[in-house]
Image (spheres, rainbow, N blue to C red):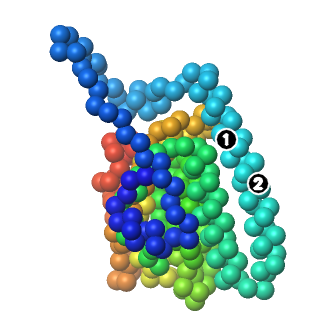
Amino acid sequence: MENSGMGGFLRNRRFESYVDASSAGPKLVAKEKVVEQPPQTAESDEYRGDDGWFSVFISWIRIVVCFISMMFTTFIWALIMLVLLPWPYQRIRQGNIYGHVTGKMLMWILGNPIKIEGAEYSNERAIYISNHASPIDIFLLMWLTPTGTVGIAKKEAANGVVKNNLSLIIFPEGTRSKSGHLLPFKKGFVHLALQTRRPIVPIVLTGTHRAWRKGSLHVRSTPITVKYLPPITTDDWTADKVEDYVKLVHDVYVKNLPESQRPQP
């Protein structure tokens, strides 16, 4: 795995990151004859290669192993959660440990090369948001979000986040994008920012839609990049500019995503 600021990142994680870095040597091109290949569009390049029956078969095996592994770890942590019923914060902490262990394990099973950028922003008490185009996104965020992070569905629960010094993780699109193109953002994350005054840390995921697209059972060994962007301060945000803040954060994603994942016109 390649990453920037990984020293601080690893010190703040309970479990060391899975290292799976490989590099190929330079390809030699015959000087006598160079055959120009037609440029590939985003659509034609999106799911090319690795479509043979053997690759699909191996992919199915990996998915089955992921499912069985998740069932096992979920059962073990469910027992732990029952013991910790009187201690809510400890349940959250154990839930994060479950996520770190299970997410890392599932990504190891799938075998995608992963590059992490901006890891120095990954330990803020913040509202973490992420684009969402693949089941892999959930595995990555289970693994890489800091301890003390919870998912939240109701704005009414925001007070508990501040009281217990927690972070949030949200998919602002509200659903997965089948094509990988960024969808419009819902307003919920802005309302939560107004209530908690937590900074917003965008997490930009690239390549996950190619690795495991929505509605497919074929996982490809596509490289994946996880990029944490600098926190967006919300201290001076006001309730009358919600639409402006949604657009501001959406534009940050448009700027940082590759052309193949930007919103369709």
Residue at label 2?
71
Look at 47% across and 39% down and name the residue there: 222
Which disc is residue 54 wearing?
none
Amino acid residing under circle 2: Met
Q: Judge left or right: residue 57 versus residue 25.
A: right
The reply to whether residue 170 is in sight is: no
As helix, strand or loop, the secondary structure at mark 1 comes to helix
In the picture as drawn, the residue positioned furthest to the top comes out as: 32
Look at 57% across and 37% down and name the residue there: 219
Whole-percent x and y of residue 167?
53, 76
Whole-percent x and y of residue 5?
35, 66
Number of labelled discs? Answer: 2
Look at 54% across and 24% down and name the residue there: 51
The reply to whether residue 63 is in sight is: yes
Amino acid residing under circle 1: Ile
- How far apart are the two marked residues, 2 and 1, measured between alpha carbons? 12 Å
As helix, strand or loop, the secondary structure at mark 2 comes to helix
Label 2: how many residues lie within 10 Å, few (<14), some (14-19) or many (20+)? few
* Front-lying residue, 128 or 225: 225
Locate the C terminus and report the quarter of the image it occupies.
top left
Residue at label 1?
63
* Image quadrant where residue 29 sits: top left
Q: Judge left or right: residue 226 versus residue 165.
A: left
